[in-house]
Amino acid sequence: MTFTPKRFGASFVVLLGAASVISCATHSIARDPSVSSEQRITEVDAKLATLRPILRGHPPRVSSEDQRREVEREWKDTETELQEISKRSEPTPEIEWRLGELYRFGHNLDVPGAGKQCVSHLERAIALRPDYAEAYLELGVFYTDAGLRWAPLGEANLKKAIEASKPTPLPRAWRALTFAYYYQGKFADSAAAADQYLLLVPDDDDVQQMKKVAQQAASRGATGFAPVGRLEVP
């Protein structure tokens, strides 16, 4: 059973068009000393929001080499801007978290060293704020999507994210935890995590199917990884 991520078509072009406009605005703002840090961060957040649907998983959601090059350029511009903001202020968990997410995107773009940078910045964010649910979530998603050997670290961080976010539900953490359990052969736990996620997001067809596969594996007493193709961790 194979799950295939949807590709971006015309909407991808719209996203890149928006990113280009944002890039021009942010490029000048980041270097203008009269602009407040809050405004710089707002502009960077807009760029991260544009990159997120394209780079949140591997492989990136691109359909041509030209589009990939454009995304790589936008990613690099955002890296430069965030690094400049970071240099101009004291370390904060919020900036470290943004850098961590950006380098997770870079890891999905196969940028050399991006995975190590992702972990480093997210660990700094957690050191500065030990109850930072979003940083644990980002780290958990990174490890879960990095490969089977990292799934236990994904599980550990996703559980911390869920605990730190209480009483606010954290759908992305439950979704990623479904995969982290599955990749370890913890099929009953995977189905239970899927249940928690589907209570919050009932229309996710991929997770509904993932739950069925996990339940079937658990009912057979399976202990090894049962391949289902690549499912994208958000």
Image (tube, grey):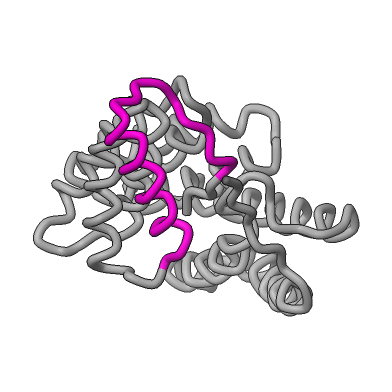
Give the left or right position of residue 16, taking residue 33 as reference: right
> Is 136 above or below relative to 168?
above
Q: Give percent across and percent down for residue 4.
A: 64, 54
Residue under the point 49% across and 46% down: 99
The answer to which of 75 and 11 lies nearer the viewer is 11
Q: Give percent across and percent down for residue 66.
A: 90, 58
Q: Give percent across and percent down for residue 79.
A: 62, 49
Residue under the point 35% across and 41% down: 216
Residue under the point 24% across and 37% down: 188
Residue under the point 41% across and 21% down: 224
The answer to which of 97 and 64 lies nearer the viewer is 64
The answer to which of 185 and 65 lies nearer the viewer is 185
Let me know if residue 117 is in the magenta part.
no
Residue 139 seen: no
Highlighted range, magenta: 204-230
State which quadrant residue 125 falls in: top left
Give the left or right position of residue 119, taking residue 10 as reference: left
> Is 33 above or below relative to 133?
below
Let me know if residue 226 is in the magenta part.
yes
Give the left or right position of residue 171, taking residue 30 as reference: left
Give the left or right position of residue 5, taking residue 73 as reference: left
> Is 14 above or below relative to 153?
below
Residue 110 seen: yes
* Farthest residue, direction left: 167
